[in-house]
Amino acid sequence: MKKIRKAVIPAAGLGTRFLPATKSIPKEMIPIVDTPMIQLIVEEVVKSGIEEIVLITARNKGEIEDHFDYAFEVETTLDRKGKTELADVSRRIAKMCNIISIRQKNPLGLGHAVLCAEAAIGDEPFAVLLGDDLVDAVIPCTKQLIDIYEKHKASVVGVMEVPAEETSKYGIVSGREVESGTWKIDQLIEKPAPGQTQSRLAIPGRYILTPNIFDCLRRTKPGSGGEIQLTDALQLLASEDALYAHRFQGTRYDTGDRVGFIDATISYALKRPELRDAVKLIMKKHLGESQ
Ligand code: UTP
């Protein structure tokens, strides 16, 4: 069985839910406290033991590539001023991993974005992490899914339970539970209306895929909004090969959504010892005012 060495991060979407910020800034570069959300995702990849990242980008997203490169003038200026620690913060990001970047020239959907990675991935299994989806976990979410992939030797999607009224926001899976927290999937439905499915197991944005997903994607016709849906290709994979779902441990934030972004910002700020007390005071002040 081949080891997972590569991760695809689709980050070519338009980010319309975050306008006007995303008019000229890639959504993925918006910081959670002081760290761009894409860096937090890359850190998850690296902590999961993956060495190479295939970034799917688009026009106006060049800042993402710059962020993972050296910033020579900033770093040498900081060194000259004796601020080596800060210079090292910047250099550490460039050293973190190898990034190959591929342009998705038209935003034809998540499935299409993954298909754009085919030449860089080749005949290997790989991880997919959405560029605006954070999971805060003790064991990185991607590492948890890799362990399930190695056990069952098949593709795996990370799932979480959502309330019935939220199924319409996600791809929902159903199947047979093969061990506590792991299911063999029979069916995937993209954004079902409340009540349309009994299952409440939603796919937020973490996957381990075998390379036969590319063939499934090629055979997937554009669905809603003219986009090639990854969920439709996963349904093909589940019926022709095998697909597992695993309920990961950790807290997930949809940072492409304004409320999810605010939730992540408060939570990550409260975890920083140097910010915690100040943030608590600010929250008390605002909560007092709004009562
Ligand atoms: P989203 O639908 O959450 O992102 O796609 P979006 O399209 O950027 O955002 P809104 O809805 O307009 O606000 C989930 C992930 O898939 C990527 C996005 O960049 C995001 O990380 N994506 C989506 C692509 O790479 N290409 C696409 O064609 C669509």
Image (spheres, rainbow, N blue to C red):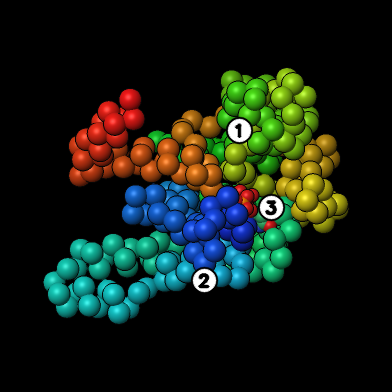
**Callout 3 secondary element:** helix
Judge whether residue 84 can be spotted in this image.
Answer: yes
Residue 60 image point, x, y percent: 56, 70
117 shown above or below 75: above
Residue 117, by quadrant, is bottom right
Going by the numbered disc 1, the residue's amino acid type is Val
Q: Residue furthest left?
A: 82
**Callout 2 secondary element:** helix
**Is label 1 or label 3 in front?**
3
Q: Earlier in the sequence, mark 3 or mark 2?
A: 2
Mark 3 and ligand 1: say if the CB distance to the nearest ligand atom is below 8 Å.
yes
Q: Alpha carbon of mark 3 to alpha carbon of mark 2: how far?
A: 19 Å
Residue depicted at 47% across the width and 69% down the height: 63
Residue 245, by quadrant, is top right
**In the image, which disc is placed on residue 110?**
3
**In the image, which disc is placed on residue 62?**
2
**Which residue was labeled with disc 1?**
159
Residue depicted at 77% across the width and 24% down the height: 196
47 shown above or below 184: below
User: Residue 20 or 67: which is nearer the viewer?
Assistant: 20
Going by the numbered disc 3, the residue's amino acid type is Leu
**Callout 1 secondary element:** strand
Mark 2, Cα crowd under 10 Å, few <14 / some 14-19 / many 20+, is few
Q: Alpha carbon of mark 2 to alpha carbon of mark 1: how far?
A: 31 Å
Q: Earlier in the sequence, mark 2 or mark 1?
A: 2
Residue depicted at 58% across the width and 43% down the height: 206
Mark 2 and ligand 1: say if the CB distance to the nearest ligand atom is below 8 Å.
no
Q: Earlier in the sequence, mark 1 or mark 3?
A: 3
| Relative side of 154 to 150, left or right | right
| Relative side of 222 to 83, left or right | right
